[in-house]
Image (cartoon, rainbow, N blue to C red):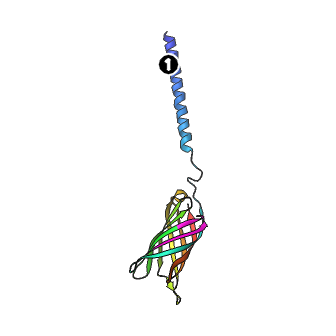
């Protein structure tokens, strides 16, 4: 009887050891499973154009503007934008900008520039820089810089803006 008990105890210990090793292997495999793009970031050109509508929320200084737009570009595809811009008494522009792709991915930017040039016909040209400060969806953690040119008129709220730069995501 003692031999049977000893044999049974040995078998239990062997199976416990095998189970522990198997559990360890499964845990190691599970922790190493990741999507291929989880750790690999890529830097690509960012080029996009949007038709915009601007509304002066507060006459200045500081002037506060709200801008919305619809457009298309790479890598955002068909997308929209929402911007909040402020011009101080010296004509300095600061603001925020959010691009939203058709599937809901987002890119968050901060903007900096200087007062727009307005010609004798009332046409506006505004050059500014956007710094990409993250995002959502596939653009979570994105970085980059964009040069932008906005065109409009003091006589209408309609305009356009184009972006050219790079994004890393």
Q: Position of residue 119 (x, y in %)?
A: 52, 88
Most distant residue in the bottom direction: 120
Vertical arrangement, residue 30 with respect to residue 63, above or below = above
Q: Position of residue 56 (x, y in %)?
A: 44, 77
Please tell me whether mark 1 sits on a helix, a strand or a loop.
helix
Residue at horizontal 56 percent and vertical 47 percent from the top: 34
Residue placed under numbered mark 1 in the picture: 9
Q: Is residue 84 magenta?
A: no
Q: Position of residue 90 (x, y in %)?
A: 41, 82
Q: Choose between 55 and 7: the one closer to the eye.
A: 55
Most distant residue in the front direction: 156
Vertical arrangement, residue 140 with respect to residue 120, above or below = above
Split into 4 quadrants, where in the image is the C terminus? bottom right
Q: Choose between 64 and 135: the one closer to the eye.
A: 64
Q: Choose between 169 and 13: the one closer to the eye.
A: 169
Residue at horizontal 47 percent and vertical 81 percent from the top: 115
Q: Is residue 67 magenta?
A: yes
Q: Can see residue 42? A: yes
Vertical arrangement, residue 138 with respect to residue 126, above or below = above
Q: Position of residue 55 (x, y in %)?
A: 46, 75
Residue at horizontal 56 percent and vertical 44 percent from the top: 32
Would you call the spot at circle 1 few (<14 residues within 10 Å), some (14-19), or many (20 or more)?
A: few
Most distant residue in the top direction: 1
Number of numbered discs on residues:
1
**Prevailing secondary structure class for the magenta stretch in the rendered image:** strand
| Magenta span of residues | 66-80
């Amino acid at each position: 009887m003692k031999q049977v008990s000893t044999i049974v105890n040995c078998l239990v210990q062997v199976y416990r050891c095998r189970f522990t090793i198997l559990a360890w292997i499964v845990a190691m495999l599970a922790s190493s499973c990741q999507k291929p793009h989880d750790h690999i970031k890529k830097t690509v050109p960012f080029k996009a154009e949007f038709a915009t509508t601007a509304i002066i929320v507060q006459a200045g200084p500081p002037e506060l503007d709200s801008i919305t737009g619809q457009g298309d570009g790479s890598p955002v595809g068909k997308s929209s934008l929402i911007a909040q811009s402020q011009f101080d008494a010296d004509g300095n522009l600061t603001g925020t900008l959010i691009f939203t792709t058709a599937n809901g991915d987002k890119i968050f930017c901060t903007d900096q520039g200087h007062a727009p040039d307005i010609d004798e016909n009332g046409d506006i040209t505004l050059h500014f820089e956007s710094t990409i400060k993250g995002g959502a969806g596939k653009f979570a953690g994105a970085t980059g810089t964009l040069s932008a040119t906005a065109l409009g008129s003091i006589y209408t709220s309609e305009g356009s803006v184009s972006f050219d730069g790079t994004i890393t995501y």
